Image: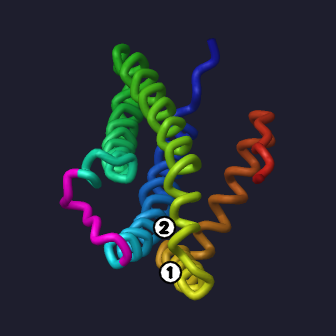
């Protein structure tokens, strides 16, 4: 077995936290807010009603919260693992597995439900507002930070011989 250097683990955890909670979820929150505003206006359905609470949209919101909890646990597990705690490797592996499993089902739910449904309610003017908000979120994080992380990720992928799947 080859051990993963502590610095790589810490970098992965930090990058995951930045990209997931600071970038991805914030952008999705903007999309969800705009989508829900349209749905409420047109249909009167609100996040507090029983129908909404039973829907996949409510589940997407809960999954965001759970993914953030798992990321925080992952960072904690990485710190413990880095201190050479023998049991920490098992905990870290379990957290990674839980995170990946939830993330895959979450992305599937978004692809099947959220994104197609939101297209029915969000017009071109709204899309312009969304893009503006997405750009603001990226500027708030720092464009230079994001560019640096993209370069580091590409370098890590090259070293590990991981190819990203083409976007469709």
**Count the marks: how many?**
2
Determine the secondary structure under disc 2: helix
Residue 166 lies left or right of residue 31; in this view the side is right
Determine the secondary structure under disc 1: helix
For the residues labelled 2 and 1, the Cα–Cα distance comes to 8 Å
Q: Which mark is residue 27?
A: 2
Dominant SS of magenta comes to loop
Query: Residue visible at 53% across and 46% down?
Result: 11
The residue under label 1 is: 133
Residue 5 location (% of width, % of height): 57, 32
Judge whether residue 42 can be spotted in this image: yes
Up-down relation of residue 63 to residue 5 (above or below): below
Up-down relation of residue 118 to residue 157 (above or below): below
Q: Which mark is residue 108?
A: none
Question: Residue 44 in magenta?
Answer: yes
Q: Circle 2: is it few (<14), some (14-19), or many (20+) Cα within 10 Å? A: many
């Amino acid at each position: 077995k080859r051990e993963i250097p502590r610095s790589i683990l810490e970098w992965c955890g930090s990058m995951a936290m930045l990209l997931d909670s600071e970038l991805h979820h914030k952008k999705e929150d903007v999309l969800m807010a705009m989508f829900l505003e349209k749905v409420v206006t047109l249909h009167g359905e609100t996040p507090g009603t029983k129908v909404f609470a039973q829907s996949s949209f409510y589940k997407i919101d809960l999954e965001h919260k759970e993914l953030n909890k798992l990321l925080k646990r992952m960072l904690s597990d990485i710190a413990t693992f880095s201190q050479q705690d023998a049991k920490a490797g098992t905990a870290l592996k379990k957290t990674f597995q839980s995170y990946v499993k939830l993330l895959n089902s979450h992305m599937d739910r978004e692809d099947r439900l959220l994104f197609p449904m939101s297209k029915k309610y969000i017009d071109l003017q709204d899309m312009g507002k969304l893009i503006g908000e997405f750009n603001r979120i990226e500027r708030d994080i720092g464009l230079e930070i994001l560019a640096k992380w993209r370069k580091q990720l590409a370098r890590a992928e090259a070293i590990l011989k991981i190819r990203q799947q083409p976007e469709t």
